[in-house]
Image (spheres, rainbow, N blue to C red):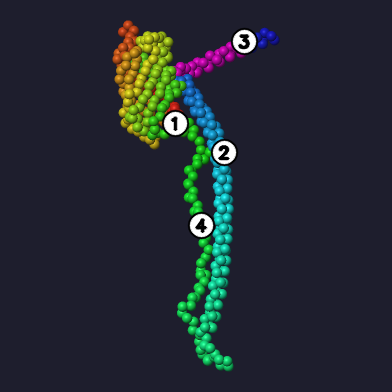
Amino acid sequence: MARLLQVVGVLALLGWTGGGVAAWMLTKEQVKVEILPDSGGENAGAQALAGLEDRISTLESDLRALTRALGENLGAMDEALREDQARHAKDLGTSVHRIETLVEQARGEQARAAAGLDARLVALDAELDGLANNGAALAAASQPEITAGEAAQPGTETEIPTDTPVLVADAGTDAAEPAVDPEPAAATPPRKRSFLAFDLPSDDFRFDERRTWTVVPELSRVGFDAKSTLHDFTGVTSKLTATFSVDLAHPADAPTGRVVVDATDLNTGLEDRDVAMREHLDTGNHDQIVWELAGFDADTVDADQQSVTGTVRGRMTIRGITRETTTPVKLHVDKSRRLVMEGEMMLKLPDYEVPVPNKLGLISMEEEVRVWLSLRARPEAREEH
């Protein structure tokens, strides 16, 4: 029984092996293995991460500004409320005092008017009494003497002399009304800004004003593309510093800028080639490549799209030698309020006394290389004047 089980196990093993070989023979023509070159995924991931970090930094700056502005605005609102309360209390006190003054003035005028009226009434009574007495005397003087027993002739009228004074009461004279000072015209208060209105750093941007921009190295790259008899290659670095001052709406109005690249950090992907490149650039004595902006010749300026195209004129310094350069560029402001600058130019190595690599005449590099840049810059805070 044990021997039978061993035979069965051997047959099963042989069958399994044979089946595997047959499957391999059937599928070997349909299986294709390819090794794809690196498509820059690592660099793309690093760029995306740097962009995220820059965006988080911008949001942090906005949050700090928002917190600071909220505290300042709430303080200003409290102070404004206190000022309004004090002003209203003062105005109320002034109004009450003014009303009391007017009431006292009215009472005084009323008392004076009443006293004057009383005096006029007394004088009028005296004049009326005098008039009555005069009338009686006049009537007696004009009446003819009548003997006892004689009666006065009917129809006889008593004539009053025309020179008799007649007293007419001035009943239409009213007491003078108290004078009231006119209310001063209230000054129109300046329109106050809402305490919920905030100026955030990321919104502190206008296309038509001069601003200073600082390049974000993590989001920027400069490099060159070279051709050789063996294969083409690229050198690139993000180790750089750069600042620009420009009015994007008027880029030709005295722009300034400077880019400094660490030549020791240029990377072509091969260590031996990088060592030879640094020797040719003489990075031991000249470890920086410097480009300075001299002028901007604009072709198009689109304020709506916040973009500019044109040619920048500058001075390139390599190995301590400076040459004039012209570079076509495109500028635009992205959604994160960053200035994106892209451009390229052709550069001849002999112009800067850079030896052109050549190995025994078999592997040689062309003397002209394409230099390119892709920069992203953040605006600095606006200077307060």
Residue for point 33% across, 29% down:
252
Would you say the residues marked 3 and 4 are in contact, meaning their CB atoms lie under 8 Å apart?
no
Would you say the residues marked 4 and 2 are in contact, meaning their CB atoms lie under 8 Å apart?
no
Q: CA distance from mark 3 to mark 4?
A: 133 Å
Q: Looking at the image, is mark 2 or mark 1 earlier in the sequence? A: 2
Label 4 is placed on what type of residue?
Ala
Check the picture and name the quadrant holding the C terminus.
Answer: top left
Label 1 is placed on what type of residue?
Glu
> SS of the residue at dot 1?
loop
Task: Specify the farthest residue to the top.
Answer: 360
Q: Magenta region: which residues?
A: 11-39
Q: Looking at the image, is mark 3 or mark 4 earlier in the sequence? A: 3
Q: Looking at the image, is mark 3 or mark 1 earlier in the sequence? A: 3
Would you say the residues marked 1 and 4 are in contact, meaning their CB atoms lie under 8 Å apart?
no
Q: CA distance from mark 2 to mark 1?
A: 25 Å
Return the residue at label 3: 10
Disc number for residue 246: none
